[in-house]
Amino acid sequence: MPVELLGKSAEELRAFVTSLGEPAYRAAQLYRALYAERRFDFAAMTNLPADLRARLASAEGGRITLPRIVRRFQSVDGSIRYLLSIGGEDVKPAQIESVFMPREGRQTICISTQAGCAVDCHFCLTAQLGLIRNLTAGEIIGQLLVALEENREQLLPQTNVVLMGQGEPLLNYDATLAAVRIMLDPKGVALAPRHVTLSTSGIVPGIDRLAQEKIRPNLAISLNASSDEQRDALMPINRKYPLAVLLDACRRYPLRPREYFTFEYVLLGGVNDSPEDARRVVRLLAHIRSKVNLIPWNPGNLPYRAPTPESIEAFRGIFLEKGVPAFVRYSRGQDVFAACGQLASIESAIPLSAP
Ligand code: SF4
């Protein structure tokens, strides 16, 4: 049975090629062909000798299984969301989503780390799927490679990756970090660490673990509330890791010079968007090097309302007054449901009832 190669690290590929009786340096060539040159057909790996290419393509060799594009949805703003199919034969099949968003000299690619999600944030449609399964490192990096390859002709100079699609990345830690290491490896996809952002609902043991990593992405925390009571109601994970515990983990996180946390705050009209909320959040974030992304809610399939333009401005103004950088981010691709978790749930025709 061929060995799946996508998602393997340089060391794992070395073990694989030496098991075939090949010299170890062939692994570096294979690694380069896969991740730097995006060659997914052994015949196209012309940096390898022909006899090795033939062995790799044989039944005892390897295989490269990319997520398969089921549908493409093109937004009027240029974003493309992909519904992808993964798994098959020996791995549970599932559908996941990724989004390609080109803008001002860069593309931002949003990818999933799990199929479905167990975290149950009440404003998120993915939560209604429950957890289907963790993705493998190959399925995570594969989403990035597919999006880059699909848009090869019109790639902009910079690529940003956000791990904000389906799933909680820190609950699939090993596979997520294995994929991130390949993204950040100068011999792999070669993205700059500051261009890759991992977004968490606040899984404290995962944050502590990430703090120990030598090479790591930016960390974004999905905050969305100004008190435990409010956050318990929106994000039940807060009962396990309440605000004080979560923010303590942020305070002990060894930020590097010029590194900061991004706090994501979805503004839900009449729920968490009052000036008192803004003041409480400013107090919560005191002594944490942070910037805040305010994301006005898109009215849709869940029972929340959009904040008014005045409340958005007033909310942001309170952060700026206190010297906390705050930005308003409108979700891209709204017409193709490119906001967090809205894609596969619609495709799977999950009943979109109120949480
Ligand atoms: S917002 Fe993220 S962590 Fe929360 S349920 Fe949705 S996918 Fe999971």
Image (cartoon, rainbow, N blue to C red):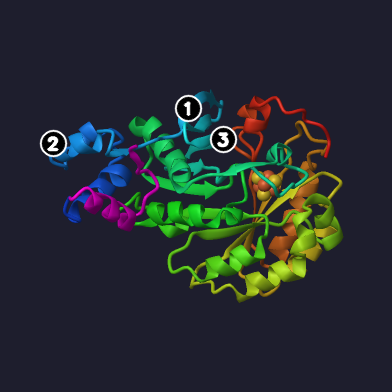
- Give amino acid for label 1: Ile
Give the quadrant of the N terminus: top left
Q: Is residue 204 magenta?
A: no
Residue closer to the observer: 158 or 350: 350
For the residues labelled 2 and 1, say whether their Cβ atoms are less than 8 Å apart: no
In percent of the image, x 56 and y 35: which residue is there?
Answer: 96
Name the residue carrying label 3: 96
In percent of the image, x 64 and y 25: which residue is there?
Answer: 347
Tell me if 84 is positioned left or right of 263 in this view: left
The mark closer to the camera, 3 or 2, is 2
Residue 60 location (% of width, % of height):
27, 38
- Give amino acid for label 2: Ala
What residue range appears in magenta? 1-21
**Can residue 104 be spotted in the picture?**
no
Is 332 located above or below residue 315 in the figure?
above
Q: Residues within 10 Å of mark 3 (few under 14, many from 20)?
A: many
The mark closer to the camera, 2 or 1, is 2
Name the residue carrying label 2: 50
Instruction: Check residue 69 in the rendering and tell me which mark sits there, or answer none.
Output: 1
What secondary structure is found at the residue carrying circle 3? strand
Residue 71 location (% of width, % of height):
52, 23
Q: Quadrant of residue 225?
A: bottom right
Residue 222 location (% of width, % of height):
67, 54
What secondary structure is found at the residue carrying circle 2? helix
